[in-house]
Image (cartoon, grey):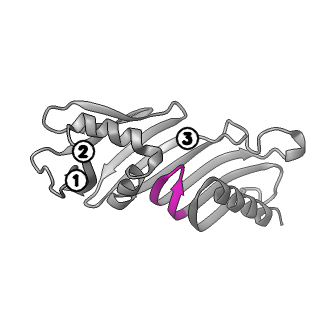
């Protein structure tokens, strides 16, 4: 009864937080097979996500030691001591849709200023990012990469090594960032806070 109720609650919260989400699986693990207000582990697998106008291909989330607080306590649903391990896959289409959204207009302008070119889209090729200009031409001479350091991610020019900070959030710790042939995968740890 309680796992089904919690699963429904998690689905409801995800659908409220995300503009779009396809939930593939929610797994609740309690080692003692008994619910006492604590969930030992919660696994969430989803795809085709739009969260905060960010397009995400797929996501895997693992949260440990969640202490539930019920609404009549007038506290947060989850304690703010919970942390989630999150694996995110971003395709070039995800990144292009995000950068073309009005919410991320200032980030796109910052990138255009940094690369000294207005661009229409990006390509991911040979583990690098290429910017496609408004006339549809790619500047193949200059490619870019992403570097991370604890709470931030920077766009880096592979020739002169100049950096542009594109993410800086003290609630997030970036653990890994991988380039593949057609997508980027990011592993991070995030605080879970629900008001």
Circles 3 and 2, Cβ within 8 Å, touching? The answer is no
For the point 35% across and 43% down, which residue is it? Answer: 108
Q: Where is residue 113 in the image (x, y as percent from the top left)?
A: 26, 35
For the point 13% across and 49% down, which residue is it? Answer: 139
- Dot 3 corresponds to which residue? 190
Residue 68: image tag: none
User: Is residue 40 part of the magenta span, yes or no?
Assistant: no
- Write the start and end of the magenta stretch as one range: 46-57
Q: Is residue 158 above or below residue 139?
A: above
Judge the density around disc 2: few (<14), some (14-19), many (≥20) Cα neighbours within 10 Å: some
Q: Where is residue 92 in the image (x, y as percent from the top left)?
A: 32, 58
136 or 12: which is nearer to us?
Answer: 136
Alpha carbons under labels 3 and 2: distance apart: 33 Å
Residue 118: image tag: 2
In this rendering, would 154 be left or right of 51? left
In which quadrant of the rendered image does the N terminus lie? Answer: bottom right
Residue 134: image tag: 1
Q: Does dot 2 land on a helix, a strand or a loop?
A: loop
Q: Along the polypeptide, which appears first: circle 1 or circle 2?
A: 2
Q: Along the polypeptide, which appears first: circle 1 or circle 3?
A: 1
Residue 61 visible in image: yes
Circles 1 and 2, Cβ within 8 Å, touching? The answer is yes
For the point 25% across and 49% down, which residue is it? Answer: 119
Judge the density around disc 3: few (<14), some (14-19), many (≥20) Cα neighbours within 10 Å: some
Q: Where is residue 36 in the image (x, y as percent from the top left)?
A: 83, 51
Q: In which quarter of the image is residue 107?
A: top left
Q: In which quarter of the image is residue 83?
A: top right
Residue 147 visible in image: no
Q: Where is residue 33 in the image (x, y as percent from the top left)?
A: 77, 60
In this rendering, would 40 be left or right of 70? left
80 or 27: which is nearer to us?
Answer: 80
């Amino acid at each position: 009864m309680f796992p089904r109720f919690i699963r429904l609650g998690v689905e409801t919260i995800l659908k409220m937080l995300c503009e779009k989400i396809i939930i593939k699986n929610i797994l609740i693990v309690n080692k003692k097979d008994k619910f006492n207000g604590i969930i030992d582990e919660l696994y969430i697998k989803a795809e085709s996500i739009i969260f905060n106008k960010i397009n995400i291909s797929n996501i895997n989330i693992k949260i440990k030691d969640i202490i539930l607080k019920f609404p009549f306590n007038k506290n947060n649903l989850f304690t703010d001591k919970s942390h989630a391990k999150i694996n995110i896959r971003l395709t070039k289409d995800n990144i292009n849709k995000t950068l073309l959204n009005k919410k991320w207009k200032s980030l796109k302008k910052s990138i255009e200023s940094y690369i000294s070119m207005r661009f229409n889209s990006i390509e991911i090729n040979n583990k690098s990012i290429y910017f496609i200009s408004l006339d549809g031409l790619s500047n193949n001479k200059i490619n870019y990469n992403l570097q991370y350091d604890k709470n931030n991610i920077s766009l880096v020019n592979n020739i002169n090594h100049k950096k542009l900070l594109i993410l800086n959030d003290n609630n997030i710790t970036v653990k890994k960032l991988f380039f593949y042939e057609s997508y980027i995968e990011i592993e991070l740890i995030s605080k879970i806070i629900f008001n």
